[in-house]
Image (tube, grey):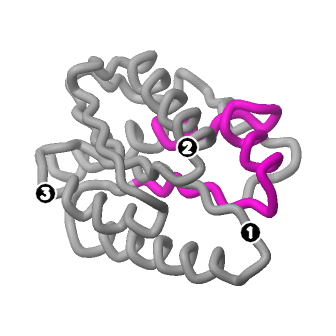
Amino acid sequence: MATKNHNLSDYDINSVPDATGMKVGIVVAEWNENITAALLNGAQQTLMKNGVFPEDIEVMTVPGSFELVYGTAQMVKKNFDAVIALGCVIRGDTPHDRYICQGVTYGLTRLNVIQDTPVIYGLITTLDMQQAEERAGGKMGNKGDECAVTAIKMADFRRKIEKD
């Protein structure tokens, strides 16, 4: 979890490799759409600001965060340099959030282990809607920005590994 003073949108532009020519897939959950749409916007803007062309960003939606695993598994079969999974789970009156978060975390981790395309974890897990809003363009920045930077860095890492 991010520290209290860490803004998710802060990064050193000089530490981000040139993303020109990179192709990025984004899978975004429709559930909590007010949050996930903001995450998606942040990711897209950051990718483009760092050199990814709009036509090289493909966005697919899934109903909820649990479905991010299947959606991402399908996206990695395509020719992307990285795939970003964006969702939002907010704790409620039942323990559903624990099961969803655990399943998504395990599933996305497994995808990173069994295939070659970097999968970027962009699941916001919060106690309430205010915390989610703070991490989707509010005072904590935008997790989508952070995921886009991570996607670029991991795609660059993959390219360097494949060159050797």
Query: Dots 1 and 2: beta carbons under 8 Å?
Result: no
Give the residue drawn at x 43%, y 27%.
44
User: Quick one: label 1, few (<14), some, or many (20+) residues within 10 Å?
Assistant: some
Q: Is residue 99 visible?
A: yes
- Location of residue 133 in the rendering, given as x and y in whole percent from the top left corner: 74, 41
Residue 77: assigned label: 3
Question: Which quarter of the figure has residue 93?
Answer: bottom right
Give the mark, 2 or 3, whose residue is nearer the N terminus: 2
Q: Residues within 10 Å of mark 2 (few under 14, many from 20)?
A: some
Residue at numbered disc 1: 91
Q: Around disc 3, counting alpha carbons within 10 Å, would you say few (fewer than 14), some (14 to 19), or many (20 or more)?
A: few
Is there CB contact under 8 Å for labels 1 and 3?
no
Q: Are marks 2 and 3 in contact (CB under 8 Å)?
A: no
- Please give left or right for residue 146 compared with residue 133 in the image: left
Task: In the rendered structure, find residue 3 and report the number of the disc placed on it.
Answer: none
Count how many numbered circles sit on residues in the image: 3
Looking at numbered disc 2 in the image, what kind of residue is underneath it? Glu
Labelled disc at residue 33: 2
